[in-house]
Image (cartoon, rainbow, N blue to C red):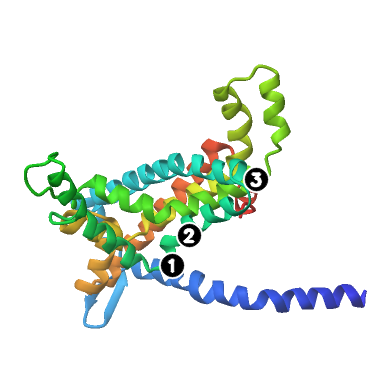
């Protein structure tokens, strides 16, 4: 009995720092964010309960269109990241061996040895009107004048996919490594095609890793600020930029808090919808490294 009690105390002691961290840096700020979003200024230093910040969001087309646009592009970036990461993860997990496998993992990790700002500015230097890509197009005769590749939705997509690829590859590699090769060999012996084996064996087995990677990548894209702002320019129309404008530029914390809470609701709903569509349980998905 005393042993069980001491184990419980030890567990509580070990969990206390994590619970304090979650409470102080996650739970309390979100509660404060919600309370701020439900207030409006009625006088100097005076605030009253109001839904005006949310009414402003609904009444102003720019805000809710940017909201929808951010969600759509984030979903597109997540899908593209999955399509690109899956063959890379398969090669690392099932084809590469020894040092080659380690080298591929290092290559995936290499861009993250520098900050997100530096990585994004690298794309900026490559794609600007006087950048490397434009110069190559002119040198090879594919373009007769400088080509501006920045400030397009496709450019934002490229930047988001590049910034998120590693967070899709790692969960997929961990899921695919646990797939028994004998199952695939048996499927081939029974006459299975590449497509049927992929659809009936590989994808169901990798589904938790795919879902975990998609959740992480979607969250990163949805909350990204630097990449859409730098690569998309002033007309990027990204919702996090609207939040930044309300908090930092206009000092309208109530409106910024409403926008922040709306972004939280959007991410939560889309993650829930994704789990429902893929028929995955959150507990199983979160167990995927």
Q: Residue at x 37, y 69 (%)?
A: 115
- Report whether residue 55 is seen: no
First in residue order: circle 2 vs circle 3? 2
Determine whether label 2 and label 3 are within 8 Å by CB.
Answer: no
* Residue occupying the far right of the picture: 1
User: Looking at the image, is 43 positioned above or below residue 119?
Assistant: below
SS assignment at label 2: helix
* Residue occupying the far top of the picture: 191
First in residue order: circle 1 vs circle 3? 1
Dividing the picture into quadrants, the one containing residue 43 is bottom left
Residue at which label 1 appears: 113
SS assignment at label 3: helix
SS assignment at label 1: helix
Determine whether label 1 and label 3 are within 8 Å by CB.
Answer: no
Q: Is residue 121 left or right of residue 188?
A: left
What numbered label is drawn on residue 208? none
- Image coordinates for residue 17, horizontal then vertical, percent: 62, 78
Q: Is residue 96 left or right of residue 34?
A: right
Residue at which label 2 appears: 109
- Image coordinates for residue 94, horizontal then vertical, percent: 61, 41
Residue at which label 3 appears: 177
- Report whether residue 155 is seen: yes
The answer to which of 19 and 33 lies nearer the viewer is 19
* Real-space Cα separation, disc 1 to disc 2, in angstroms: 7 Å
């Amino acid at each position: 009995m005393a042993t069980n009690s001491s184990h419980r105390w030890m567990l509580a002691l070990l969990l206390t720092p994590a619970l304090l961290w979650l409470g102080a840096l996650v739970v309390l700020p979100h509660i404060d964010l919600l309370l701020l979003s439900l207030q409006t200024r009625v006088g100097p230093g005076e605030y009253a309960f109001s839904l005006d910040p949310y009414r402003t969001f609904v009444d102003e087309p720019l805000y809710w269109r940017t909201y929808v646009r951010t969600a759509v592009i984030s979903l597109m970036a997540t899908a593209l990241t999955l399509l690109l990461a899956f063959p890379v993860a398969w090669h690392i997990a099932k084809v590469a061996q020894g040092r080659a496998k380690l080298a591929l993992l290092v290559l995936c990790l290499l861009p993250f040895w520098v900050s997100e700002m530096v990585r994004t500015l690298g794309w900026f230097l490559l794609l600007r009107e006087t950048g490397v890509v434009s110069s190559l197009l002119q040198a090879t005769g594919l373009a007769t004048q400088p080509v501006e590749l920045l400030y397009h939705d496709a450019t934002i997509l490229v930047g988001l996919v590049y910034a998120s690829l590693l967070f899709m590859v790692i969960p997929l590699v961990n899921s695919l490594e646990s797939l028994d090769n004998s199952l695939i060999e048996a499927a081939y012996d029974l006459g299975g095609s590449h497509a049927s084996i992929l659809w009936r064996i590989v994808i169901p087995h990798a589904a938790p890793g795919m879902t975990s990677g998609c959740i992480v990548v979607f969250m990163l894209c949805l909350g990204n600020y630097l990449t859409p702002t730098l690569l998309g320019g002033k007309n990027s129309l990204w919702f996090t930029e609207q939040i930044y404008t309300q908090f930092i530029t206009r000092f309208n914390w109530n409106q910024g808090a409403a926008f922040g809470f709306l972004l939280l609701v959007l991410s939560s709903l889309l993650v829930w919808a994704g789990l429902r569509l893929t028929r995955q349980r959150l507990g199983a998905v979160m167990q995927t490294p």
